[in-house]
Image: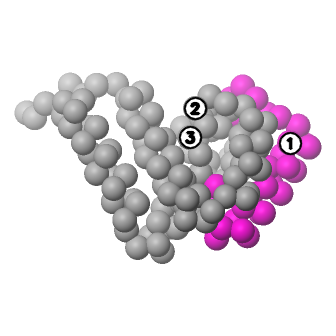
């Protein structure tokens, strides 16, 4: 029976995943970004992990916050041509809305790279929470 990869092996794997994400063709980069749920997506449309990460289990927000998130998602996607992906990392939906708004004036290439790096940050955080395999 094989043992779990050592922590360094996971780090190496995630570093390679980041390099791959940053260098693959743009249409594949956009597909990767668009595979993530929108910030503030309907709770029934996200995975259990996204549900917890986006704070639905303890913070529902207000109708005004939801309308703001919907508007920001639309503006962001119209401006950049892909979804806003961010490593939420325990921040409130209001904090994330503020962050999303601050990114609306960013350079498209830099913003795409930031989003792709955050995809890997999400994966890294999820991996860290997994129980070790027997």
Which residues make up the magenta segment?
56-84
Q: Name the residue under label 1.
A: 65
Position of residue 12 relative to residue 36, above or below, is above
Q: Residue at x 38, y 29 (%)?
A: 128
Quadrant of the rendered image containing residue 6? top left
Q: Is mark 3 on a helix, strand or loop?
A: loop
Decide if residue 39 is in sight here. yes
Circles 3 and 2: CB atoms closer than 8 Å: yes
Q: Is residue 26 magenta?
A: no
Position of residue 24 relative to residue 113, above or below, is below
Q: Which residue is drawn at 73% across and 70% down?
A: 78
Q: What element carries label 2?
A: loop
Q: Name the residue under label 2.
A: 89
Quadrant of the rendered image containing residue 63? top right
Q: Mark 3 points at which residue?
A: 87
Which quadrant: the C terminus? top left
Q: Residue at x 74, y 35 (%)?
A: 95
Say which of 4 and 19 sits in front. 19
Q: Mark 1 or mark 3: which is in front?
A: 3
Quadrant of the rendered image containing residue 64? top right
Tell which circle, 2 or 1, labels the residue nearer the N-terminal end.
1
Residue 61 percent location from the top left of the image: 83, 34
């Amino acid at each position: 029976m094989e043992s779990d990869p050592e922590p360094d092996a996971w780090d190496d794997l995630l570093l390679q995943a980041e390099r791959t994400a940053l260098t693959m063709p743009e249409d594949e980069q956009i597909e990767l970004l668009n595979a993530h749920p929108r910030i503030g997506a309907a709770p029934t449309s996200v995975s259990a992990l996204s549900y917890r990460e986006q704070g639905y289990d303890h913070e529902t927000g207000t109708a005004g916050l939801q309308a703001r998130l919907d508007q920001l998602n639309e503006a962001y996607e119209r401006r950049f041509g892909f979804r806003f992906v961010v490593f939420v990392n325990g921040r409130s939906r209001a904090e994330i809305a503020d962050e999303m708004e601050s990114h609306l004036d960013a350079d498209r290439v830099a913003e795409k790279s930031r989003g792709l790096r955050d995809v890997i940050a999400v994966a890294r955080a999820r991996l860290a929470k997994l129980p070790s395999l027997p």
